[in-house]
Image: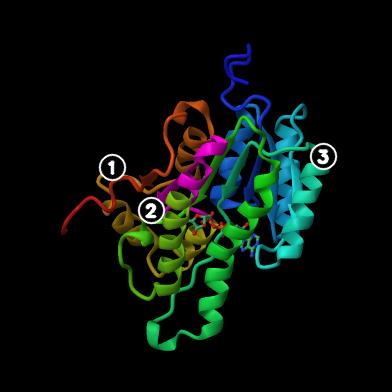
Amino acid sequence: MEGNGCPNKLCGRIALISGGAQGIGQAIAARFQREGAHVFILDCDSDRGQKAAEGLTTQEPSLPAEFLRADLREQSAILQAIAAVRKSKGRIDVLVNNAGIELERSFDRLTQQDWDRILNVNLRGAFLLTQAALPLFPDSGGAIVNVSSIHATHAFPDSVPYACSKAGMVALTRNLALELCPRHIRVNCICPGYIDTRLWEEYLRNSPNPAALAAQTTALHPLGRRGVPADVGEAALFFASEASAFITGANLVVDGGLTLRAHS
Ligand SMILES: NC(=O)c1ccc[n+]([C@@H]2O[C@H](COP(=O)([O-])OP(=O)(O)OC[C@H]3O[C@@H](n4cnc5c(N)ncnc54)[C@H](O)[C@@H]3O)[C@@H](O)[C@H]2O)c1
């Protein structure tokens, strides 16, 4: 651990990252491993999850990453995954609630199934995973990092269930942070803006004019570029490490200034 002769920020820590098979979660897993953490990737996508864990292990054979298959909609699968961590390492120091799904659908076309699917993965899943993981946190404490979105605070078209799930994540963060102070477990939240992940790349490739779309979306960002998963990885590392030892219940916007302007 930092201060114990190890220069890395997460040396010896056990970290569990939901949705770590790809995109932002994968970048967080890679960043944590580079700082000395033993990483568990929890995901419902076995192929990608296995590949991501193998990739990390190849990069750092002394810190083999482990994949846990679980769908966050199923409490029994979550409990099984946590039991596997208990058996393998006996504790969790850092939990990242990152897994999430989006839906673009106008309010009048939304079904109860749509609402349940988004809320059950994005918010109920984080609740269930956190509740299952908490008994494994040591008495010395730890860190929980929740991945919300700028949708929690800003309105976008056709995004009601997603926005509500992400606003719920901010409320979950603040309330849980207060409840877990006596256990020295800090709970913080990241609100990413537009981050270039696989889905964005696909969307861009399939658009009629990828160059124009890329230029147009870049121009929305006062910092002059779109976000990359590593940008969120750095923020997650900050909240997971001792660098943020006196911060809990906070919400960090990582959006290149996208939401700063009152009007354009
Ligand atoms: N990419 C962005 O622009 C952006 C912006 C703001 C917030 N976010 C949030 O960041 C998080 C990661 O987004 P991303 O772009 O990397 O997405 P992604 O689709 O690339 O990755 C999400 C991962 O979560 C997993 N997952 C989905 N449903 C699951 C379930 N039921 N159980 C277990 N795992 C499940 C997927 O298999 C996938 O590996 C999400 O919570 C998303 O809402 C993303």
**Magenta stretch holds residue 196:** yes
Locate the N terminus and report the quarter of the image it occupies: top right
Q: Amino acid at mark 2?
A: Gly
Disc 2 residue: CB within 8 Å of ligand 1: yes
Mark 2 or mark 1, which is nearer the start of the sequence?
2
Is the residue under label 3 in contact with that under label 1 (CB below 8 Å)? no
Amino acid marked by disc 1: Leu
Find the distance from the CA under tag 1 to the CA under tag 3. Answer: 43 Å
Mark nearer the viewer, 1 or 3: 3
Quadrant for the C terminus, please. bottom left
Of the image marks 3 and 2, the number of the one nearer the N terminus: 3
Q: How many marks?
A: 3
Left or right: where 172 falls relative to 216: right
Coordinates of residue 173 in the picture (x, y in percent): 46, 51
Q: Is residue 256 left or right of residue 10?
A: left
The image shows residue 12, relative to residue 44, as above or below, that is above
Residue closest to the far bottom = 108
For label 1, the residue is 223
Query: Which residue lies most toward the front here?
Result: 182
Quarter of the figure with residue 2: top right
- In front: 180, or 260? 180
Q: Which mark is residue 88?
A: 3
Asked if residue 232 is among those painted magenta in the image, a careful observer would answer: no
- For the residues labelled 3 and 2, the Cα–Cα distance comes to 35 Å
Residue 193: mark: 2
Q: Residue at x 55, y 52 (%)?
A: 98
Residue 40 drawn above or below residue 202 = above
